Amino acid sequence: MVSPYRGEAFEQRRHKRYKVCAAAKIEPLDDEDDRITPIEVVVADVGLTGMMLRADRPVPIGSSWRLCLYESQRLVTSVPIIVRYCTPEAAGRYRLGTQVMLEPFFLTWMGVPRRELAADELATEDRFAYSHAPNGRS
């Protein structure tokens, strides 16, 4: 089957992807991890469950980030993502395949125990901050 995008391999998806071009930043999902600086990215396509981003540096596969969209230097929205692949492109750029994930805080607030969430393939206890759970839920 032929890819809808020139020069890109065909991927089967459950949801349609839409070609876009939007400047954004990805920041470490764990707010306390100040060793990692935000990375400026371009959102190249988006669908219900994922996005393809372009970045100037590689990003580890399996790492969790918060994609932040700004307008006039003001945060409009953010969404947690996990990097599923990172492939080099021309001129030192990288293509990141990302999957949208539920906010870890949402899961712990709803009663999912941290130890179970940590065992999940999308989360590890040292990656996420759980200190904001209301009423001591964790």
Image (spheres, helix red, strand yellow):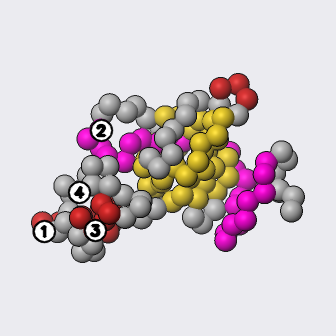
Q: Which residue lies most toward the bottom here?
A: 111
Residue at (59% x, 35% y) in the render = 55
Q: Is residue 78 left or right of residue 110?
A: right
Residue receiving disc 1: 135
x, y percentage for residue 26?
A: 47, 42
Element carrying mark 4:
loop
Q: Which quarter of the rendering shows the N terminus? A: bottom right
Q: Nearer the viewer, mark 3 or mark 4?
A: 3
Magenta residues span: 8-33
Task: Examine the structure image and report whether residue 52 is included in the region drawn in magenta.
Answer: no
Helix, strand or loop at label 2? It is loop
Residue to which mark 2 is pinned: 33
- The C terminus - image quarter: bottom left
Asked whether disc 1 touches disc 2, contact meaning CB atoms under 8 Å apart, the reply is no
- Tell me which residue sits at (55%, 52%) in the image: 84
Between tags 1 and 2, which lies in front? 2
Residue indicated by mark 4: 130
Residue type pointed to by label 3: Glu
Identify the residue under disc 3: 116
Q: Nearer the viewer, mark 3 or mark 1?
A: 3
Say whether residue 31 is magenta: yes
The residue shown at (49%, 41%) is 60
- Mark 1 vs mark 4, foreground winner is 4
Could you say which quadrant of the image residue 27 lies in? top left
Q: Amino acid at mark 1?
A: Asn
